[in-house]
Image (cartoon, helix red, strand yellow):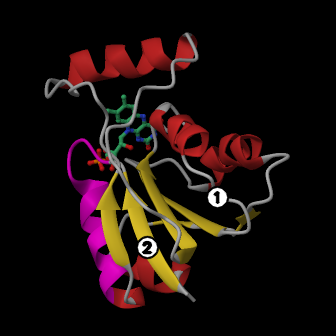
Amino acid sequence: MKSIVIYFSTTGNTKTAAESIAKKTGSDIEELKAVQNWPTNFDDLAALAQKQRDSNVHPEISSQINLDNYDKIYLGYPTWYEQPPMIINSFFDKFDLENKTVVPFSTSGSSTFEITVPYVYTMVKNKNIKLDDGFRANSEDEITSGLK
Ligand SMILES: Cc1cc2nc3c(=O)[nH]c(=O)nc-3n(C[C@H](O)[C@H](O)[C@H](O)COP(=O)(O)O)c2cc1C
């Protein structure tokens, strides 16, 4: 079986980390895209992110990804307000991940990775998904040690 890196990124940091992880692990890679566009202006993006979080919005995903042949998914996201962006909820809504292993990773300005973990834990709860520890991927060093 194979592994795939699936990432969400609006300003490119998580994309860079995802590409590195794909290269190091020999995984395929796909971007998690939303139907809506993300504002490029920070204040507008922050306002939208906050609104989605506060109203429990799960933004619709436009990416069509066939996960049948993968048993391990590296799932990357930026830390937004000390949690994963709400589109990560949409990811778990949309895709059947039963019996697969999910390895989360995040990039952030300064927050720890661990602060986001309880949210991911809630998303996989009562689903037959194996959630690995995961890691912060702010640098090549963090990626290398996270993949050990
Ligand atoms: C709406 C919003 C909220 C953020 N909240 C946090 C946060 O709580 N802690 C943190 O360390 N960084 C925070 N950041 C910074 C991002 O996590 C960081 O820049 C990340 O690497 C962006 O990833 P991307 O370039 O893949 O989109 C936030 C950024 C945005 C846009």
Coordinates of residue 145 in the picture (x, y in percent)? 51, 84
Earlier-in-chain disc, 1 versus 2: 2
Q: Amino acid at mark 2?
A: Ile
Say few, some or many: other residues with alpha carbon within 10 Å of mark 2 (under 14 / 14 to 19 / 20 or more). many
The answer to which quarter of the image holds residue 72 is bottom right
Picture layout, residue 145 above or below residue 135? below
Coordinates of residue 45 in the picture (x, y in percent)? 27, 23
Picture layout, residue 33 above or below residue 146? above
Quadrant, the C terminus: bottom right
Q: Secondary structure at mark 2?
A: strand
Q: Residue at x 79, y 50 (%)?
A: 127
Q: Amino acid at mark 1?
A: Leu
Residue at the farthest right position = 126
Residue behind mark 1: 97
Residue behind mark 2: 4
User: How far is mark 1 from mark 2, CA to CA?
Assistant: 12 Å
Q: What range of the chain is rendered magenta?
A: 9-23
Question: Can you tell me whether the CB of the residue at mark 2 lies under 8 Å from the nearest atom of ligand 1?
Answer: no
Q: Main secondary structure of the magenta part?
A: helix
Picture layout, residue 138 above or below residue 93? below
Picture layout, residue 15 above or below residue 91? below
Question: Can you tell me whether the CB of the residue at mark 1 lies under 8 Å from the nearest atom of ligand 1?
Answer: no
Residue 21 shows up from this direction: no
Q: Which of 5 and 24 lies nearest the eye of the viewer? A: 5
1 or 2: mark nearer the eye: 1
Coordinates of residue 44 in the picture (x, y in percent)? 23, 16
Q: Secondary structure at mark 1?
A: loop
Q: Which of 142 and 96 lies nearest the eye of the viewer? A: 96
The answer to which quarter of the image holds residue 92 is top right
Q: Is residue 49 left or right of residue 128?
A: left
